[in-house]
């Protein structure tokens, strides 16, 4: 059902945890399945210097969180916001159709964190 890459990210997620003195946090939930994702950002000179996540959810939600953090680390905010669902799914070598919505959670959590930072 899942690609090898999804399983790898699920079993050994990258950048999992909290940033205690984060500059921004984005928290989103999926009302349909009840999964929750939190993204923490450390930002300097409009660049994401560190990023971590906490996700309570399915294997796909954890894998997309992990790959998202890899994709946005050391990117400017503008570059990071260009990471979309398609990019995440491609990076993971695909997701089953019924799990595509999980990738949207990661993008929404990142956008929310950046929004909170800009406010
Ligand atoms: Fe809820 Fe994957 S099933 S985010």
Image (cartoon, helix red, strand yellow):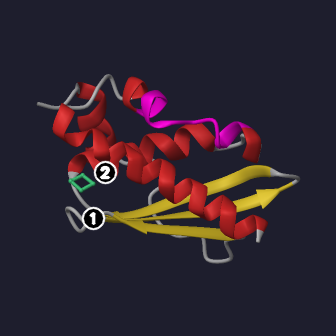
- Residue 66 is left or right of residue 25, and the answer is left
Q: Can you see residue 12?
A: no
Marks 2 and 1, Cα distance to the nearest angstrom? 8 Å
Q: Quadrant of the C terminus?
A: bottom right
Q: Residue at x 44, y 29 (%)?
A: 86
Question: In which image quadrant can residue 114 be found?
Answer: bottom right
Q: Ligand 1 near label 2 (Cβ, under 8 Å)?
A: yes
SS label for mark 1: loop
* Mark 2 or 1, nearer chain start: 1
Along the line of sight, which residue is nearer the eye, 105 or 47? 105
* Residue 107, horizontal then vertical, whole percent: 49, 48
Of 2 and 16, the residue lying toward us = 2
Q: Which residue is mark 2?
A: 61
**Over which residues does the magenta segment extend?**
79-88
Instruction: Give the residue number, with chain letter if any, for mark 1.
Output: 35
Quadrant where ligand 1 appears:
bottom left
Report if the beta carbon of the residue with label 1 is closer than 8 angstroms to ligand 1: yes
Q: In the image, is 41 to the left or to the right of 56?
A: right
- Local SS, label 2: helix
Instruction: Give the farthest residue toward the bottom.
Output: 20
């Amino acid at each position: 059902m899942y690609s090898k890459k999804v399983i790898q990210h699920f079993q050994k997620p990258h950048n999992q945890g909290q940033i205690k003195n984060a500059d921004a946090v984005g928290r989103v939930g999926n009302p349909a399945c009840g999964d929750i994702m939190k993204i923490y950002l450390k930002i300097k000179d409009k660049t994401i210097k560190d990023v971590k996540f906490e996700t309570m959810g399915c294997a796909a939600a954890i894998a997309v969180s992990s790959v998202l953090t890899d994709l946005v680390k050391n990117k400017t905010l503008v570059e990071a916001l260009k990471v979309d669902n398609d990019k995440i799914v491609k990076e993971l070598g695909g997701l089953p159709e019924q799990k595509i919505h999980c990738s949207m959670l990661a993008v929404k959590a990142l956008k929310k964190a950046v929004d909170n930072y800009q406010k």
